[in-house]
Amino acid sequence: MSKKPNWSDLENQVNHLSPAEGLALLAELFPGKIVFSTSLGQEDQVITQLIATQNLPIKIFSLDTGRLFPETLDLLARTESKYKTRIQVYYPERDSVENWVAKNGINGFYDSVENRKSCCYVRKVEPLKRALAGNEIWVTGLRAEQSANRSEMKKIEWDEGNQILKYNPLLDWTFDEMIAYIDEHKIPYNPLHDQGFVSIGCAPCTRAILPGEDARAGRWWWEDSKKECGLHTR
């Protein structure tokens, strides 16, 4: 196998490749050290299809926060069945969840931004760190047009918080391009998307958006923040 390119060389290579080609290249350059985190959103379903149909050695994992929609969990099972693959599920630490609820209440995340972020940390950020440990490339389904914060991201970038290179293969895809790909390849997706849910997370923290609203408006709608949970910070 050829020597791994440095970060800038890697970025130059990947920027000129399709998502399928980029995933294949990184799987070759970082064997056994590349993982993909799926939240079962439409972007993530596209990437799962690309990995599975190319039979790429990229481990796929998901985070079950304990507060997900039933439709999301059902989609996980349908996806595994369709692509004959296993998605490894990580759960929050039991003691951490129990302590958080004992201190803040079952829905204490509504009380303040600080409470919500600490809940996200317990249920999502800490499990993510366990899932990423020991790996070198983290594949995500982020798209630039999803939010102002994400519009500044690059296809290959260093994630300081998790000390890992992040690859965003669909970063420059539009929403319409993504939907067209899903339709063409008959990719399973969450039926909540057809009910106005664009970005789907935990059930108590997600609502459908209204026509003209920002794609992230349905997440943590009761607060004024950057609409991030701490998984993707810069």
Image: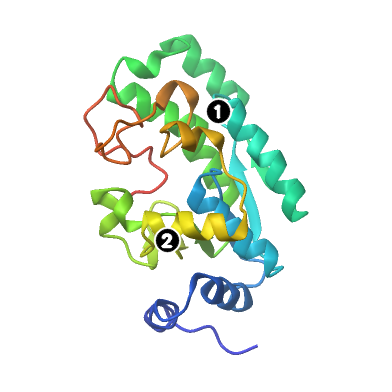
Q: Secondary structure at mark 2?
A: helix
Q: Amino acid at mark 2?
A: Glu
Q: Where's residue 116, x and y in %?
A: 36, 25
Q: Earlier in the sequence, mark 2 or mark 1?
A: 1
Q: Amino acid at mark 1?
A: Leu
Image vertical order of residue 146 relative to residue 108, above or below: below
Q: Quadrant of residue 213?
A: top left
Q: How many marks?
A: 2
Q: Which quarter shows the N terminus? A: bottom right
Name the residue: 54% across, 65% down.
136
Few, some or many residues within 10 Å of mark 2 (<14, 14–19, 20+):
few
Camera-side mark, 2 or 1: 2
Few, some or many residues within 10 Å of mark 1 (<14, 14–19, 20+):
some
Q: Where's residue 146, x and y in %?
A: 33, 49
Using the rendered image of the protein, determine whether residue 163 is visible from the camera's viewpoint: no
Q: Where's residue 39, x and y in %?
A: 53, 43
Name the residue: 39% across, 26% down.
207
Q: Quadrant of residue 208?
A: top left
Name the residue: 41% across, 39% down.
198
Image vertical order of residue 96 relative to residue 180, above or below: above
Image vertical order of residue 111 relative to residue 41, above or below: above
Q: In this image, 192 relative to 9: left or right?
A: right
Residue at the bottom extreme of this rendering:
2
Q: In this image, 62 relative to 212: left or right?
A: right
Name the residue: 45% across, 62% down.
166
Q: Which residue is mark 1?
A: 68
Residue 177 marker: 2
Image vertical order of residue 36 relative to residue 101, above or below: below
